Amino acid sequence: MLYPLYEYYLQSDLSLEEVLKHFVSRFYLKKNGTDKVEKVLRKVSESSKMNKLFAQSSQQRIAPNYVDFGSVINEIMYFMFQSNSTQALAVLAAAIAWDKQVNQRAHLKNANAVRDDAIKIFKKFSIYEDMTQAEYEEMTNR
């Protein structure tokens, strides 16, 4: 049965990094290889546009949200024609990078708020994945 990943991760106690790792290992790798995961993570980390967003956030002391990360992701040529799942992975990676590079020094948003905001990308893109009810309940009933 298909279940919404937004609800799945929102109700879990996973950190944002754990959400990314779980999403990749449990769902993303079924349709994409590790080379693609590495390429997505590299494209996000090497993006001058993402670095510009981080600098603006730091200077203006404003925390970007999942829409801001998604907008920048869509400005990167590589991501313009990628699937919603690939773009969601990129948004999660961008939020993690921002948290490490900007937020941990500037303290603009607590870790749970960063996580809860970043996973909204699953809701925006209506990303559902196939799993059993037991698997869904194991994550959401913690």
Image (tube, rainbow, N blue to C red):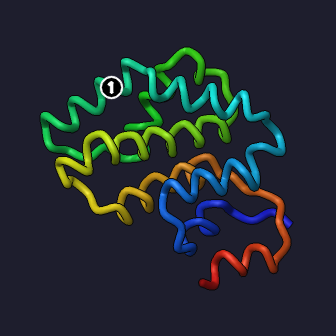
| Rendered location of residue 3, percent (x, y) | 75, 65
Residue 97 x/y as whole percent: 40, 40
Camera-side residue of 114 and 66: 114
How many marks can you see?
Answer: 1
Q: Is mark 1 on a helix, strand or loop?
A: helix
Instruction: Please tell me how crowded label 1 is: few (under 14), some (14-19), or many (20+) other residues with Cα within 10 Å.
Output: some
* Residue 78, percent from left and from top: 59, 18
Which sits in the foreground, 61 or 34?
34
Q: Quadrant of residue 140?
A: bottom right
Which residue is pictured at 83% across the width and 66% down the height? 131
Looking at the image, residue 63 lies above or below residue 116: above
x, y percent for residue 35: 72, 28
Q: Does 44 sit above or below residue 131?
A: above
> In this rendering, would 84 be left or right of 57?
right
User: Is the N terminus in the top left, top right, bottom left or bottom right quadrant?
Assistant: bottom right
Residue furthest to the bottom in view is 141
Residue at image point 78% right, 43% down? 29
Residue at 60% across, 29% down: 40
Between 27 and 7, the one nearer to me in the picture: 27
Judging by the rendered image, the residue that carries numbered circle 1 is 51
- What type is the residue that disc 1 sits on? Asn
Quadrant of the drawing holding the C terminus: bottom right
